[in-house]
Image (tube, rainbow, N blue to C red):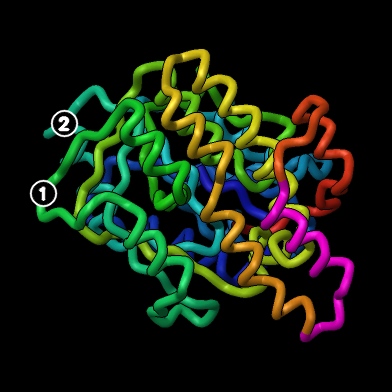
Amino acid sequence: MLPYYGDPELMRAAVRSVQAQTDPQWRLTVVDDGREPGVPEWFAALDDPRVRYFRNPENLGITGNFRRCVDMVEHDLAVMMGCDDIMWPNYVATMRAAVAAMPGAAMYQPGVRVIDGDGAPVRTLVDAAKKWIGPPARTERARLSGEELAVSLLRGNWLYFPAMCWRSADLKAVSFREDLTVVQDLALVMELLLRGETLVTDPEICFDYRRHAMSESSVQAFSGSRFAEIRRYLYGVADDLDAAGWHRAATVARRHVSTRVHALTMVPRALRHRELGVARNLTSHAFASRPAGRPAEEAAAEPAPSSPTSS
C-alpha cells in the first residue's frame, strides 16, 4: 500500500522501485489523497496490471488515508510504504524470507538506509539516536516482544514504519487511531504488543527511508504540535500499560525523556527564526508534568495540521 500526497516525482521513484523487485510476488496499490495534475494520467500510461491506482474523491488527511489503505489490503502481508521512500530490489524477497524463517509475528522490520531529499545517504542525529536507543546490532534475525520491547520503543521509537511488513489480519484488527496524526505508528505497535504480538527484526538492508526538512514530522516538530500529540498519547498509553501490569514501561512513557530532549534541540532553531511562541511551546514540553485533567484535554492547546504531507 502506498498512501500518496506530495511530490509526484518522488512518488514515481517509489513506484518504480517496487516494480524493480527481484521477487515477483507483490501487488502495489496507490491511494492518492491529493490533486497533483498529471498523476492519474501517469498511472494510466504505466499500464502495469500489478499496480492499481485510486484517487480519493475528497482529502482524507494523513490518518484517514492510512485507514483507507488498511481497509483495502487484500493479501496476507502488507507494507504501508512512504510515498517518498525507495524499496531496494531485494525488499520483497527479504521480507518473504523473514516471514518464512520466523512465521507468526505481527511485524517485520528490515535493515534501513537513511537518505536525504536528493536521495544521498545521510547520517542524522535522530538516526544516530535510534541506533543508540534500539537493540544491539545483530547479524541474524531476532524475535522481540513484551514489556522489554515496549520499554525500548518508549525510550525512543527506533522502528522505521514505512519499511515494516505487517501481518494483515493484525494490521486490520488495530488499524490507525483517528485522533492521531504523527504518532499513529507507535500507537499501532504498542497496541499490538499489549495484545501479545511479536516483532521480528532482520539485519539485511533493503529499504531507503527518506528524511528531509519538509516532512510532516519535521514541520510539526518545529511548530510544537508534534510534541503536544506525543505527550497526550504517552500519558494515555501509560495508563494502559499499568493496567496490563507493565509498570516499568508505564513509567518510561510518563517520563518520555527522549521527546523532552528532542524538543530542547528544536529551541535554537525556533529562536533563529524568531518564533518565540514556538520556542515557549517546545520548552514547555521539555519540562511539563502531567496535567491534572484528562490527557485528551491537552490536545486542545495545539491544532491538528490542516493538510497532510508525506512522512
**Separation of disc 1 and disc 2 at Cα?**
12 Å
Pointer 1 or 2: first along the chain: 2
Quadrant where the C terminus is found in the figure = bottom right
Residues at marks 1 and 2 touching, judged by CB atoms closer than 8 Å = no
Q: Secondary structure at mark 1?
A: loop
Residue drawn 74% across the image and 62% down it: 282
Name the main secondary structure of what is drawn in magenta: helix
Residue extending furthest toward the bottom:
272
Residue flagged by tag 2: what amino acid is it? Met
Q: Is residue 273 above or below residue 277?
A: below
Q: Pinpoint residue 1: horizontal percent, then vertical percent.
A: 50, 42
Number of marks present in the image shown: 2
Q: Pinpoint residue 124: horizontal percent, then vertical percent.
A: 45, 75
Residue drawn 51% across the image and 19% down it: 242
Q: Is residue 198 above or below residue 119?
A: above
Front: mark 1 or 2: 1
Residue drawn 35% across the image and 34% down it: 107
Region rendered in magenta: 272-288
Left or right side of 104 for 219: right
Q: Residues within 10 Å of mark 1 (few under 14, many from 20)?
A: few
Q: Secondary structure at mark 2?
A: loop
**Which residue matches tag 1?**
140
Q: Is residue 282 magenta?
A: yes
Residue flagged by tag 1: what amino acid is it? Glu
Q: Is residue 3 magenta?
A: no
**Which residue matches tag 2?**
102
